[in-house]
Image: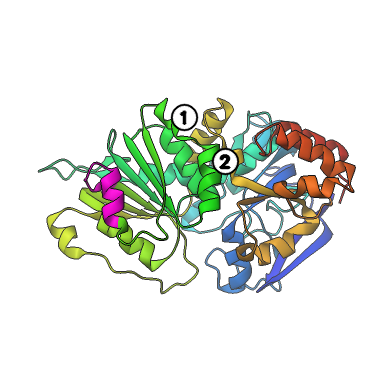
Amino acid sequence: MKTKAVRIYGVNDLRLEEFELPRLKDDEILARVVSDSICMSSHKLSMQGDAHKRVRAPLAQNPVIIGHEFCGEIVKVGKKWAYKFSPGMPFAIQPALNYMGTLWAPGYSYQYIGGDATYIIIPNEVMEMDCLLEYKADAFFMGSLSEPVSCIVGAYHAQYHTKPGSYVHEMGIRGGGSLALLASVGPMGLGAIDYAIHGGIKPARIVVTDIDQARLDRAQKLIPVESARAEGIELFYVNTKDIADPVAALRELNGGKLFDDVFVFAPVRSVVELADKLLGHDGCLNFFAGPNDPNFSAMFNFYNVHYESHHMVGTSGGNTDDIRESLALMAKGLLRPEAMITHVGGLNAVAETTINLDKIPGGKKLIYTHKKLDLVAIADFAERGKTDPFYAALAQITAEHDGLWCKEAEDYLLAHAPEI
């Protein structure tokens, strides 16, 4: 069977190609990808090429399919896995396989599996590591978002606190405590706000900061303070751009106290150092943002590490349990990850979008891999719709859903967008 896919051959060398997939082995699964969400990690892969830790170099001789936030349907199952999986079953993937101590992952390390493809072959190790997951929500794009949502879930689970005189780590944010989310109105930050309100352990107070008022306004519209209040949580949105003393201002919102948990969503030294200054006793700083610079560093107060039990954690992705939790919360309608999506396109738009992802404003870029579409912002659908009835219809559908991508929009796109 032939597939169309975007493969990487080297630094910023991404090519949309059609090629033959090998014959399916008894321990493999053939699948049809429907949607993939482009991650900043794929942009980093494009920038680094063979230097990326998950790559099995040289890429020039062993190009791999990019994309790791994907969802689709199983087409054919090798006999080894026929007892567990069947044709037609929707699936999502946990790309962090942790297979035999390697960093191999779909979207980074394999020639025949990745999210930016029409058809893929899922290798045996994905099933061996229990990383092929049945998907039960009613829209494919939700499955594509399960991986980024799992990164958020995993970060919350990685937080820990201790009781006086105890060395036992009590995992998770402090229940009934205070949580500061810094630079947190981008796509992942929005997910973090949503999970803090509707996930497992709930804080009593959440303070969200950024320096972009338009993004703060959008966040407050999508996740209003009233929705948090309904869950017994105080929620504040703060623009710290022109605040002379942000530590004092944020403490004032927290009743004059420092914070139990502080998350950093931008790899910016000043933001990290602000987070350090906001930590209270036994405070946990979560460095969520993934920097491009391997030498990125910031000052951290080690006096407070010693005397105030300050500590720091960082995670890179979630585990399989985190994805399962994400899928379950989305299937129940408790999370609204669609707020992350700001752009939609087809497989033809993947290479340029991935290379320039850091320069394209907005949130997640959602790709439908069997379609040929420019990458277009949801906010621009109406303008496009003045001359294109396809976008006029999408503009009307999304307008009826608070300007967000939705199942109705996906169904319309899958039925009416041109094939790649």
Residue at label 1?
227
Residue at 82% x, 44% y: name it: 391
Colour basis: rainbow
**Does the rendering let one see residue 122?**
no
Give the magenta-colored segment's residue range: 247-260
Could you say which is closer to the camera, residue 394 or residue 30?
394
Q: Is residue 400 magenta?
A: no
Q: Where in the figure is residue 263, as x and y percent of width and height?
A: 37, 51
Identify the mark at residue 383; answer none if there is no mark. none
| Cα–Cα span, label 1 and label 2 | 22 Å
Residue at label 2?
146
SS at mark 2 in the image? helix
Q: Count of labels shown?
A: 2
Name above or below for residue 281 compared with residue 132.
Answer: below
Could you say which is closer to the camera, residue 65 or residue 263?
263
- Within 10 Å of disc 1 (Cα), the crowding (few <14, some 14-19, many 20+) is some
Q: Where in the figure is residue 69, as x and y percent of width and height?
A: 62, 48
* In this picture, residue 22 sits left or right of residue 315: right
* Tag 2: amino acid: Ser
Q: Nearer the viewer, mark 1 or mark 2?
A: 1
SS at mark 1 in the image? helix
Residue at 42% x, 25% y: name it: 230
Residue 110 found in image quarter: bottom right
